[in-house]
Image (spheres, rainbow, N blue to C red):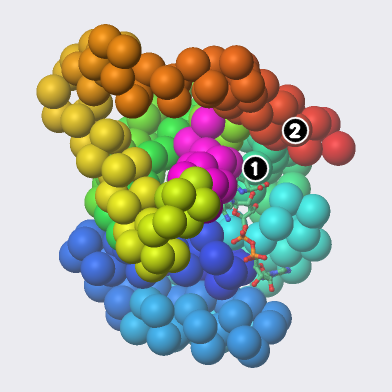
Amino acid sequence: MKLGVIGCGKMGTALVAGAVRAGALGADQVIGFDPHPAARDAFATATGSLAAASLKDLAGCDTLLLCTKPQQAAAALSALRESATTEGLLISVAAGLTLEWLGQHAPSGWRHIRCMPNTPALVGEGAAGFACSKNATEADRQTAHDLLGAVGSAHSLAEPLLDAVTGLSGSGPAFVFLMIEALADGGVRSGLPRDIALELAARTLRGAATMVLETGLHPGQLKDQVTSPAGTTIAGIAELEARGLRSALIEAVTAATRRSQELGRS
Ligand SMILES: NC(=O)C1=CN([C@@H]2O[C@H](COP(=O)(O)OP(=O)(O)OC[C@H]3O[C@@H](n4cnc5c(N)ncnc54)[C@H](O)[C@@H]3O)[C@@H](O)[C@H]2O)C=CC1
Ligand SMILES: O=C(O)[C@@H]1CCC=N1
């Protein structure tokens, strides 16, 4: 495979750097294109791959990864229509943009995959979903599965579910970063030095998440194991319930899902 990356920003860089680090892609199999020199330099440094100043330099690629913002994708694909001669596979990470939209804007004859990765792909802890166009082949589906699976988990899904993946695991790292920051603030308020509070908060999130994934126990059971009668944990949980933490998280994922649906219509 020769992979061309259109848009060398945060997500394109995280995905390629993670896949190169995992050994799923050779750095020499990838070439990025971005109009901004700073983005090209950061991509080249993080991935070890070439980053070009012209879309024409991606002409030899059989697979393209569209990593612009959704609002920038129409212009990027219009330029691709003018420069692409051969047919290939276009994998888009753009939130909301549907397979139908990709079919209308990409060069004709191309196969499409809509996917939703997340930035933890950079450290091999990604979580992603993807859906394939009708003309995509089994080999295309495998390509997406291998690329995304090299940097975390990858689920082949019915396309309408990708908006929910966007709301949960696509946007979710930001929700969790907010929680880590707030937990650390709580620790600082209770007297801990900032650096120690931040490390304790991040490790607590990671440790709890690993227990859910590795024990197979329901999160409620794991919560009960921490919660002593008349102890400290139940005092904290009562505050979280009173302040609506569960409801806030449910509404956050629902709002992000709705926004992904809106981006697909605009
Ligand atoms: N940041 C995240 O956590 C996630 C982002 N995504 C999706 O990834 C896509 C990119 O998001 P980010 O990386 O956060 O944005 P970003 O702004 O960091 O990267 C976008 C890059 O595209 C470049 N660009 C703009 N127009 C272009 C064109 N015509 N041709 C080539 N490059 C062009 C920009 O210069 C920029 O470097 C979005 O569609 C977003 O929905 C998906 C999952 C997670
Ligand atoms: O905020 C956004 O629109 C992108 C998509 C998922 C994560 N970041």
Q: Image height check: is 137 above or below 237?
A: below
| Residue 119 visible in the snapshot | no
Q: Is residue 80 visible?
A: yes
Asked if the stretch drawn in magenta spans residue 169, the answer is yes
Q: Secondary structure at mark 2?
A: helix
- Amino acid tagged 2: Arg
Which mark is in front, 2 or 1? 2
Of callouts 2 and 1, the N-terminal one: 1
Q: Main secondary structure of the magenta part?
A: helix
Left/right of residue 197 with respect to residue 261 in the rendered view = left
**Mark 1 crowd level (few <14, some 14–19, many ≥20, 10 Å Cα):** many
Q: Residue at the location (68% across, 83% down)?
A: 36
Q: Secondary structure at mark 1?
A: loop
Segment tinted magenta in the rendering: 168-185
Read off the residue under disc 2: 259
Q: Is residue 111 above or below residue 217?
A: below
Tag 2 near tag 1, CB within 8 Å: yes
Residue at 37 percent across and 49 percent down: it is 201
> In the image, residue 162 lies at what x, y percent?
55, 28
Q: Is mark 1 within 8 Å of ligand 1?
A: yes
Q: Quadrant of ligand 1?
A: bottom right
The quadrant of the image that shows the C terminus is top right
Residue at image mark 1: 95
Residue depicted at x 60% and y 80%: 39
